[in-house]
Image: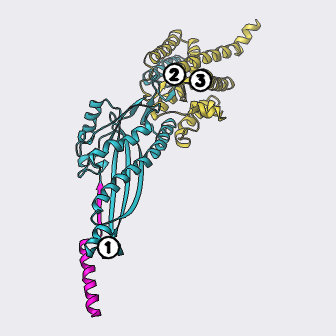
Chain colours: A cyan, B yellow
């Protein structure tokens, strides 16, 4: 009798394991794949950023899309709100993902920037992994009713968002900032999918909020690196048209002419002597 | 060895070394940092440069003009130091919009006009050409706001004019205190 009971339980556990085993979902959009399709890498030119900047915000296109099109605008609005009113920001526009082609590269970015009159584009890439694991309570799912009422599944949503700001004209990479979030919870197997979708959205929102703080800090670091001359490829020009980097410079042609005149005077004199 | 332009060579070498030893901008003119007490920047800003192009043309010009002007070393040192400090102080006092500054060209400008006065003693035509060339360059900078080779920076023609004025004063002081002038004055 006891042996039969143990065998039945073992069979049920095995069955439950088959039906409600661990599951994993992974959404990922890759910035490098988008910007450099087929491994092609364009040569960058020196970047001249005229303040105030006209900025575009967009999610890197991917298949399947990691972000629901309805949520896109709402998520990007978090970043837009954080930077509205900054003296270096002129306009911020969100770019619908339908404007960007998969593996579109800088050609696609230039088209969009031209269409929306943008200087730089902040591209948001997403890496989100969701785990749904059964717990000891999931044994009771065999009762059918348990599937509806017992929260025996533990879910985990880990999100990493990365914003890369690129200058469209020069194809220069300007700066990047990350944002992360981690949320977990429990659900019934019937509600698991719905819960995971909800958690995905919440994870993205929290990562976006985390990102805005990091982005603010990275902008400060970027400005300092330009000012210190560490980013010699980037120049920032103020509203008045003056570069952040002032200087006095000798021109090649003028220097060559000075050399010729001095050589004529002093070498000529030596020959005469 | 006596006539070797030691000061010119040393200053040029120092400017060439700056990108390797102080690439983080610790020597540049940084208005905020100077007002915070980092006053060495007033002098060292002229040794720092924004790019290799910027450094190359500034140092080549400095070497050529320094070789001509470095006859009386005390006076030469005085002109270099006076140009560096006066230009930086004027930027600090009169140009609050200039947050950062680098470049040897203000000193180059001083030596340019000084060299023109030295050349004038031998070839007036050549000296006139040097002066005309200098003011032509300043006019181009005033009209375009940039320099042909040192792209990515805002060229400040006013520092070149101030440098030229100091160079002229140095030339006058040099003539006034030269042994020949002292003898003539005595007669």
User: Which residue has dot 1 on it?
Assistant: A138
Q: Which residues are magenta?
A: A1-27
Q: Is residue B98 magenta?
A: no
Residue at 41% in and 24% down: B148
Q: Residue at x 28, y 69 (%)?
A: A147
Horizontal placement of A104 versus B177: left or right? left
Question: Which residue bears the numbered disc 2?
Answer: B156
In this view, the mark in front (1 or 2): 1
Horizontal side of residue A38 vs A268, given as left or right: left
In this orientation, which residue lies closer to the viewer: A111 or A195? A195
Assign a secondary structure to mark 1.
helix
SS assignment at label 3: helix
**Quadrant location of residue A168?**
top left
Cβ atoms at labels 1 and 3 below 8 Å apart: no
Residue A33 higher or lower than B96, as above or below: below
Q: Position of residue B104 (x, y in %)?
A: 55, 28
Q: Are circles 2 and 3 on residues that touch, CB within 8 Å?
A: yes
Tell me if residue A28 comes above or below residue A81 in the rendering: below
Where residue A150 appears, x then y in whole percent?
33, 69
A40 lies above or below B162: below
| Residue A17, position as x, y percentages in the image | 27, 75
- Residue B180 lies in what quarter of the image? top right
- Asked whether A21 falls inside the magenta stretch, the response is yes
Let me know if marks 1 and 3 both belong to one chain: no
Marking on residue B91: 3
């Amino acid at each position: 009798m006891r042996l039969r009971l143990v065998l039945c339980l073992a069979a049920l556990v095995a069955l439950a394991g088959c039906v409600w085993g661990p599951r994993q979902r992974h959404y990922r959009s890759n910035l490098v794949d988008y910007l450099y399709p087929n491994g092609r890498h364009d040569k960058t030119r020196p970047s001249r950023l005229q303040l105030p900047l006209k900025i575009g915000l967009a999610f890197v296109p991917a298949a399947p899309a990691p972000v629901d099109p309805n949520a896109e605008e709402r998520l990007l609005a978090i970043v837009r709100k954080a930077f509205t009113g900054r003296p270096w920001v002129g306009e911020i526009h969100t770019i619908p993902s339908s404007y960007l082609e998969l593996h579109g590269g800088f050609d696609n970015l230039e088209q969009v920037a031209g269409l929306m009159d943008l200087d730089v584009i902040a591209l948001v890439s997403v890496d989100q992994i969701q785990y749904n694991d059964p717990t000891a309570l999931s044994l009771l799912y065999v009762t059918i009713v348990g599937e509806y009422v017992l929260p025996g599944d533990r879910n985990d949503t880990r999100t990493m968002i990365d914003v890369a700001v690129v200058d469209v004209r020069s194809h220069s990479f300007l700066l990047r900032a990350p944002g992360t979030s981690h949320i977990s919870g429990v659900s019934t197997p019937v509600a698991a999918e719905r819960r995971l979708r909800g958690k995905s959205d919440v994870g993205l929102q929290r990562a976006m909020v985390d990102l805005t703080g990091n982005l603010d800090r990275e902008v400060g670091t970027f400005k300092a690196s330009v000012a210190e001359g560490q980013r010699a490829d980037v120049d920032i020009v103020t509203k008045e048209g003056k570069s952040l980097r002032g200087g006095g410079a000798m021109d090649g042609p003028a220097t060559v002419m000075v050399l010729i005149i001095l050589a004529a005077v002093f070498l000529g004199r030596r020959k005469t002597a | 060895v006596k006539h070797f332009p030691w000061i010119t060579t040393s200053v040029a070498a120092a400017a060439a070394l700056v990108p390797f030893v102080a690439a983080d901008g610790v020597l540049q003119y940084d208005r905020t940092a100077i007002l915070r007490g980092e006053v060495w920047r007033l002098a060292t800003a002229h040794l720092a440069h924004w790019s290799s192009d910027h450094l190359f043309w500034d140092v080549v010009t400095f070497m050529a003009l320094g070789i001509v002007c470095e006859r009386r070393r005390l006076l030469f040192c005085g002109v270099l130091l006076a140009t560096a400090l006066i230009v930086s102080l004027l930027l600090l006092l009169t140009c609050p919009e200039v947050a950062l500054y680098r470049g040897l060209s203000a000193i180059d400008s001083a030596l340019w006009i000084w060299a023109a006065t030295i050349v004038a003693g031998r070839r007036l035509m050549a000296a006139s050409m040097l002066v005309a060339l200098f003011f032509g360059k300043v006019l181009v900078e005033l009209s375009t706001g940039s320099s042909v080779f040192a792209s990515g920076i805002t060229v400040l023609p006013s520092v070149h004019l101030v440098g030229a004025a100091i160079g002229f004063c140095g030339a006058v002081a040099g003539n006034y205190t030269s042994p020949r002038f002292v003898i003539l004055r005595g007669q």
